[in-house]
Image (cartoon, rainbow, N blue to C red):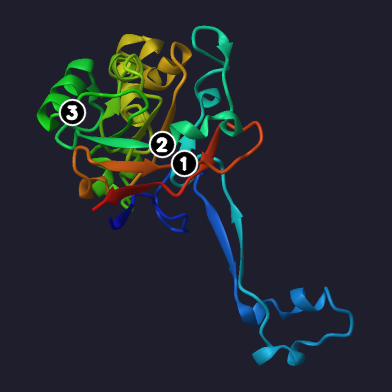
């Protein structure tokens, strides 16, 4: 049996609006021609002309938050507690068993940006694709934001998963979810108008805050989800172990046994 891998991650790169202004990643690239001195510093007496072609190594310096790029959020990101009052686990405490599991894709590209997905929407989509959720399924949400990646309006694009929809998944044993949008919730720039109208703070980050009731993780800034079927694949999304952190970067991949 052969395996096929589908990359569902975005690259960490300069000059792409993958995050709000001021939150973008920054990558400094140093070429072989610039780093001969770095190698020479380890070997007293070595000069650049003694190295092949006078070249050092290629190296990059990266300034990131743990929420840049495709990443896995730990329950600690959402609140200090989970599971109705227990201490929220950090990314280095997330069970690895959660991170390599059968995948399910819900196609919500039809919903307008700012729409808050309901439990009924999730139930209808599961019926459409013919899938019954199993404990620890990894549920990925394909929104309009996937096609907007790289555009200036990316962070304002896509529907969001509401508290009700999130709890629908968690109550059925799901512990890792994901979205190709900037956030699991509806874009802040659109939710702020609803808050201004209603004064209801419960609208803010309502999908994230569901983790206060049942602890879970979610992937953000996935990509290429339109290439996936509704089910029939495995998701690998092991996070980088950052001690005591709220998230860790991941090279998320969908795996097909063919």
Q: Are marks 3 and 1 in contact (CB under 8 Å)?
A: no
Does dot 3 land on a helix, a strand or a loop?
loop
Q: Marks 3 and 1, Cα distance to the nearest angstrom?
A: 26 Å
Image quadrant of residue 174? top left
Number of marks drawn: 3
Q: Marks 1 and 2, Cα distance to the nearest angstrom?
A: 6 Å
Image quadrant of residue 53? bottom right
Q: Residue at x 13, y 22 (%)?
A: 124
Does dot 1 land on a helix, a strand or a loop?
strand
Residue at far front of view: 1
Q: Are marks 1 and 2 in contact (CB under 8 Å)?
A: yes
Horizontal side of residue 79 vs 50, given as left or right: left
Q: Position of residue 240 (x, y in %)?
A: 56, 44
Q: Residues within 10 Å of mark 1 (few under 14, many from 20)?
A: many
Image quadrant of residue 245? top right
Camera-nearest residue between 248 and 171: 171
Residue at far top of view: 84
Q: Marks 3 and 2, Cα distance to the nearest angstrom?
A: 21 Å
Horizontal side of residue 218 vs 230, given as left or right: right
Q: Residue at x 12, y 24 (%)?
A: 127
Residue at far right of view: 44
Residue 71: which numbered mark, if any?
1
Q: Is residue 230 above or below residue 58?
A: above
Q: Position of residue 115 (x, y in %)?
A: 23, 26
Q: Is residue 2 above or below residue 33?
A: above
Quadrant the N terminus occupies: bottom left
Residue 219: which numbered mark, if any?
2
Say which residue label 3 marks. Answer: 131
């Amino acid at each position: 049996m052969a395996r096929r891998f589908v990359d569902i991650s975005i690259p960490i790169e300069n000059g792409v609006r993958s995050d709000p202004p001021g939150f973008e990643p920054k990558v400094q690239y140093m070429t072989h021609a610039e780093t001969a001195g770095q190698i020479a510093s380890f070997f007293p007496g070595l000069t650049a002309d003694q190295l092949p072609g006078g070249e050092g190594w290629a190296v990059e310096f990266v300034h990131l938050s743990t929420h840049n790029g495709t990443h896995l959020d730990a329950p600690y990101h959402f609140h200090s507690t989970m599971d109705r009052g227990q201490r929220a686990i950090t990314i280095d405490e997330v069970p690895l068993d959660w991170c390599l599991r059968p995948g399910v894709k819900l196609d919500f590209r039809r919903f307008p940006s700012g729409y808050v997905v309901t439990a009924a929407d999730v139930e209808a989509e599961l019926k459409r694709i013919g899938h019954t959720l199993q404990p620890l399924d990894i549920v990925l949400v394909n929104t309009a934001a996937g096609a907007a990646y790289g555009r200036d309006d990316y962070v304002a694009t896509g529907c969001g998963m509401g508290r009700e929809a999130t709890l629908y998944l968690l109550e059925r044993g799901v512990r890792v979810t994901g979205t190709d949008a900037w956030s699991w919730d509806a874009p802040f720039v659109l939710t702020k108008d609803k808050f201004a109208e209603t004064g209801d703070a419960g609208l803010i980050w309502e999908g994230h805050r569901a983790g206060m009731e049942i602890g879970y993780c979610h992937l953000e800034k996935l990509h290429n989800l339109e290439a996936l079927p509704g089910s029939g694949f495995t998701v690998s999304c092991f996070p980088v172990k950052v001690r005591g952190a709220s998230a860790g970067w991941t090279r998320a991949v969908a795996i097909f046994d063919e």
